[in-house]
Structures are given as C-alpha cells and as structure tokens.
Image (cartoon, grey):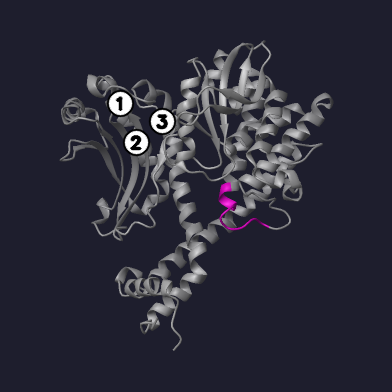
Amino acid sequence: MESQKPVVSEEMKTFLQEGLHTYASALVAVSEFRRQIRSRLQTVLEEHSPRLSERGLPINNLVFKSARLDDQNLPESWSSIELEKNYGGGLYANYHVIWELTKPKERQVRVGVWIWLGTLPDRNRLFGALQNHQSLLRKTHLLQDQNGLSRLASYCDPDRFYSIDDAFQTLIEEWVELLSAIGGIRQFLSATSSRTNT
Amino acid sequence: MASLPAEWHAPRRLIVAHSRLPRLSPSAWHSAKALIRACQAMSEAESGPLVRMYKASKERMSPLSDPLDVQFPLHRQLSSSREEVYSDWLQWVLEQVSDAHELGCILGSQNLCQTADPHGRISVEREVPVEHGYTDQTGRLDLVVKQGSRWLAVIEVKTRAYEDTDLKKHNGYRKSINSAETELIFLSVNPPSSDPFGFRSLLWSDVCVTLRGIAPLRLERERLLATALILAFVGAVEQNLLGFVSPEPTLPPTGKVPRMVDHFTKAQMEVDHWRARNQ
C-alpha cells in the first residue's frame, strides 16, 4: 500500500522531542499538585466529619474526580480539583476548587460545595430553605444554577493559593452552619428518592 | 519511499492534525517545565525534613529500626504484590495486635473500637466462604475479624490496580452478611475511583501509619520479635505497594519525597497520640 507523504512540521518535531523528555516528569508534578490540593480539602472535611454526618452528608468514600487527561474537550482556560460523593437516591455532594485565570483577578479562584437532589422540586425546596438562612453567611455566597443545583462558594486570593485550605475551612464552617439551620439534608429528599447509600 | 504499515497511517495523520492546534504548540512544554522545576525544588527542600524524620524514626524503633531500613524487594515472597501473601501476613499482624481499640484504629473503625468487647478474644479468618459474590456465584471473603460468633469486620484486600467491575462482588458480599454491626472495609493502595458498593475505603498507607504509631509501645523484650515482624510487614507494604525507599544513602525520586514526608509526619503524630494515651 502506498503511504501518504507525512507532513511533519519543525514545530511538530520539537513538540514530540520535548515531550519525550518532559512528559513523565510533568505527570509526576501534576500528580503531586493534585495530591496536595486533595489532601488540604480532605483534611478540612475530616475535621468537620462528625458534623457533616449528623446533617446527612458523611464524607467517607469521597471520590477524587479524575484529571480528564484524555478528554477531547479538556479546557485550557480553567481547571478544577473535585471530591464528590453519590449518596444514592439522587443525592450528590461535590467539594471543589476551581480556577479560571482569564477572569479578573478577584474572580479567578474559588472554593465551593454543591448539592444535587434527584428531582427539581426537591432541589428548589432545598435552595429555598438555604436561602431563608443566608443571613448566616459572612464570607460565602449562595447561588442556584439554572438546573436547580444549590451552590455555596467563595472567591479566594490567587496570590495565596498555597493556603487554599484556609478559604475552604471558612466555606465548610459556613456550610455546616447553614445545614444546621435547615435541619440537615435528609428532609429534602422526597419519598420517591429517599433510599440513600451512605 | 518505503510504505508504512497500514496501522501507522491513522495515528500519523492524527498527530499531524493535532500539531496544528494551538493548544499543542511547543510553548505548552514551557509551562510544564516550569511546573516540573517547581516540583523538583519543593522536593529538594522537603528532603531535609524527610531525612531528619527518618533518623528520628530509627531511634524511636530502637533496638529495632525504621521499616525502610531493610530492602524488601530482595525478599522473593514479598517482592510480589500478590494479594494472598499480603492478606496472610495482615491476618497474622491483626491477630498479634488483638487489642480491640488498637485493632479498630488500624482499620480506621471507631465502630469497632466501641462495639468490640475489650476483654474478648479477637480472631481473624482468611478466605471465608459466603453464599453470594459476583452475580449468581458464591464468594470468599479475604479477611473476617471475629469476636466469638460476632463478625466485627470484613476486609477485602487489593494490592494492585483493579477495574470497577472487580468490585461488583461487594454487592453479593453485602447480601451475605446479615449483621448491621459488621464493618465492611475495602483496603487498597489508591482510593477507589468509584463507590466500592457500600464498603468503606481504607488505604494501606493509613494502616502502616497506625502500625508505626503502635510499634514503639511494643518494644519490650517479650514482644520484640513479634514487633520486628510487624515492622517488617510495614516495610514490605511501604516499599512494594507504596513505592517508598529509604532516604539514605540516596534520596528517593522527586515525586516520592513529599508523599514520604506526609507519611512520616502522620506517623509521628500517631506515635504522639499512642504515647499520650498510654501515659
């Protein structure tokens, strides 16, 4: 079979040659970066573990979301590190750090938590209850996505990214306070979706 | 020009196409190199504390030594990561410990600490047959921690990478275990990337950290040999499953140093915790 004439630019050659020497070390560095951020989030969550459990969101078996290295839609302008748990019955919780360096500096980095419930009425009921107590919030912001998902988030100083755990600590403290005010998460699971797996 | 094998045409076209995308421009490696340099610099800076903590650990374990002081990859049986070998030795280690509170801490189980009879004998059984495993199949539990007829904990052991489908048998195991007090534990090197079907994740590194914390309290003459074997187990796990190496005389690779610093820091905290508890 006759081959097609290969088109290999000089830039392509350089890219591949550089990759040969850089790829493995880059993966190690990325892995260590992810591990350190994860460890900081996990430490804060473990500190609040009993209180989160009492309010219906135990943190055992949180899943560390993958780096999506082979995702064709891997974005260049933003990234995130996330811990998530599927509680069953449509209930999910997700804790994360997200950064988007193309935004204005004060909005480049944020920590957050979101809650998803299986049905839209449940999601709206939860957000309504959370909203009723948002006067408790001092440094964080409560939002609802168009799909009904409730989020609590806080922007952080990108120059102090190394102490992201401080911002996450504040977020979780206010989150626990908010959950306490609404009497925990369980009452917002409707009968049809209340079978949970903790 | 000689023709290429057919299977090379598609990949080559793909590579060429990708090279035209701006996101794969050669400059992308500059960022990667900057990150690598920062990682290497951090690792170098961390190597000082690592060596200090390693020396402190060796002193703490005297007349024995730190588990990384012996090279286990040279030991044929343990150099393999066969689950059976590590499960067998873990059974022996847990039986040596036998104290319900210590056992609960090793397994990260407050429940076990609280519900086990502190004076009752604890046994650990291997390969316990149960009615359900994978769909329409019977199963065998790797380890069962028992006190009399009570099943305090079931431990499923993984020493290598696994597929999520490997965990489906956990559903069957849950069906087979009637008692709500039985703690279901999934012991692995890395945290699972999906929920292990109702089992609680426990990491080998955490087991080692607790054993490192308990060991200095078991250095009296009567228990010295058993403690040496427990530390040998820790050494085998840390070297063969976690990829740790002694920081002397040569420092570990860049990517290992911060992980080892964290590990030794946790172990030091564990030692302090157990010393305070026993005072």
User: What is the chain identity of the residue bearing mark 3?
Assistant: A
Q: Position of residue B112 (x, y in %)?
A: 56, 19
Asked if badges 3 and 1 are on one and the same chain, I answer yes
User: What is the chain identity of the residue bearing mark 1?
Assistant: A
Relative to residue B239, is residue B170 depicted above or below?
above
SS for callout 1: helix
Relative to residue A169, is residue A72 depicted above or below?
below
Q: Nearer the viewer, residue A93 or B273?
A: A93
SS for callout 3: loop
Residue B279 visible in the shown view: no
Q: Quadrant of the image for the N terminus of chain B?
A: bottom left
How far apart in space, not on screen, are marks 3 and 1 (Cα)? 16 Å
SS for callout 2: helix
Q: Nearer the viewer, residue B24 or B91?
A: B91
Q: Position of residue A191 (x, y in %)?
A: 23, 19
Instruction: Please name the residue that numbered disc 3 is placed on.
Output: A59
Residue B161 visible in the shown view: yes
Which portion, as a residue range, is magenta?
B251-259
Instruction: Please name the residue that numbered disc 1 is placed on.
Output: A177
- Indicate left or right for A84 with B181 as reference: left
Count neighbours of disc 1 (C-alpha within 10 A) and say few if under 14, some if 14 to 19, many if 20 or more: some
User: What is the chain identity of the residue bearing mark 2?
Assistant: A
Magenta span includes B1: no
Q: On residue A170, which mark appears?
A: 2
Q: Quadrant of the image for the C terminus of chain B?
A: top right
The three-letter code of the residue at mark 1 reads Glu
Q: In terms of sequence position, does the residue under pointer 2 or pointer 1 come before the other? A: 2
The three-letter code of the residue at mark 3 reads Ile
How far apart in space, not on screen, are marks 2 and 3 (Cα)? 17 Å
